[in-house]
Image (spheres, rainbow, N blue to C red):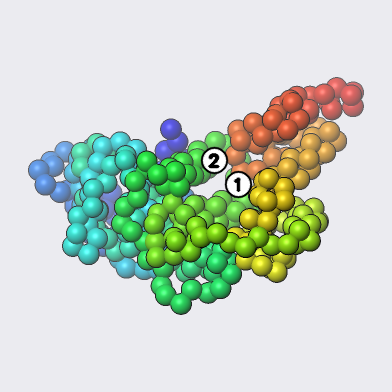
Amino acid sequence: MSHLNAFTVASTSHIDEMRAILFDVYDARLFDLHGDGTRFAAQAAYFRFGSSNLSYCAHESPVRIEFREDDYVRFQVCTAGGGRTVVNGVPVTVDQSSVVCSPSNAAMEFGQALEQFALRVSRSELERDLTSLLGARPKEALSFATTADCAAGQTRRLRETILQSAHSIDVSDEPIPAPLLREMDRTIRIAALYGVRNNFTDRLFAPEPAAAPWQVKRVEEWIDAHWADEITIDALAEVSGSSARSIFAAFDKARGYTPMAYLKRVRLHAARGMLLVARPGASVTAIGFACRFANPGHFARDYQTLFGELPSATLRRARAIAV
């Protein structure tokens, strides 16, 4: 499992060092041993997408952390051990069976040998995504439940999206282009809106009238022309003249796949074209990044599914022909 190794900010047995890092990097306001803990050892890593950031931590002794209040929502995914998060004075169990959602100023009490990823997401960005999905700006503030059971499909998807994002960040030494990071950021935010129950969940899952067939065609033509650009749900809604949920429903009805699946196919064809004419020194990873595939492993898998060979095989064949 990836631990965001390339973005480690702490690996220490000194509590004062860890406290300073938490205050400087994570904007904590309190960090100390909790309960009967005497020994101390911790690891921490931190990666920023843009409006969101993802952190990894592992503690060998019980600790308590409190954070300052800001415009973020935190989603905790525990991968080992356990603990609890105190939200408005109410303790919530943190373990591998659930995703815990809390406001930014909640207190965390980590048990011995806890490991977790914590995704901190901008509340204002979540509300903007919600507006695009619903087709209108909500009148009430977005509010999440504190826990979501990983037995539920959408919560499992959120958990896996967070863990896969950590793997994508760690999988290569090549930096991920900023536009790709923004797409990853949006993907995580949408997964969070569907993965943890909130006061708009019923509306998000309510049947939505599908857009007209001509709107589907318009979106496809727009994707064909803009596949190399950032593609957002806001843009899809604007191009189609309907809500994002309507255009997704229309694609499912008319095509049997989503607009994002169509976008992936267009980008895979673009990557194949680049591989076939690649210059000496070009790499599969760099071409994948150029076509907005953040995870080289997923790119190779999807490419092989569509074309019956790995992208590396296409590149080797193209070079052999060139010689």
> In the rendered structure, which disc, 2 or 1, sits on the residue that comes first in sequence?
2
- Label pair 2/1, CB-CB below 8 angstroms: yes
Give SS at disc 2. Answer: helix
Task: Answer above or below: position of 118 versus 115.
Answer: below
Q: Quadrant of residue 24?
A: bottom left
238 or 280, nearer to the observer: 238
Give SS at disc 1. Answer: loop
Q: Quadrant of residue 10?
A: top left
Question: Where in the figure is residue 119, as x and y percent of width and height?
Answer: 41, 52
Q: Residue at x 46, y 77 (%)?
A: 139
Q: Is residue 236 left or right of residue 224?
A: left
Q: Is residue 290 visible?
A: no
Where's the C terminus, which quadrant?
Answer: top right
Q: Residue at x 51, y 65 (%)?
A: 130
User: Which residue is tagged 1?
Assistant: 176
Could you classify mark 2 by the number of other residues whose Cα lies within 10 Å: few (under 14), some (14-19), or many (20 or more)?
many
Question: Where in the figure is residue 131, as x and y percent of width and height?
Answer: 54, 69
User: Which residue is tagged 2?
Assistant: 168
Could you classify mark 1 by the number of other residues whose Cα lies within 10 Å: few (under 14), some (14-19), or many (20 or more)?
some
Where's the N terminus, which quadrant?
Answer: top left
Q: Is residue 202 visible?
A: yes
Can you tell which of label 2 and label 1 is closer to the viewer?
A: 2
Q: Residue at x 41, y 72 (%)?
A: 141
Q: Residue at x 55, y 59 (%)?
A: 207
Amino acid carrying mark 2 in the image? Ser
192 or 54, nearer to the observer: 192
259 or 39, nearer to the observer: 259
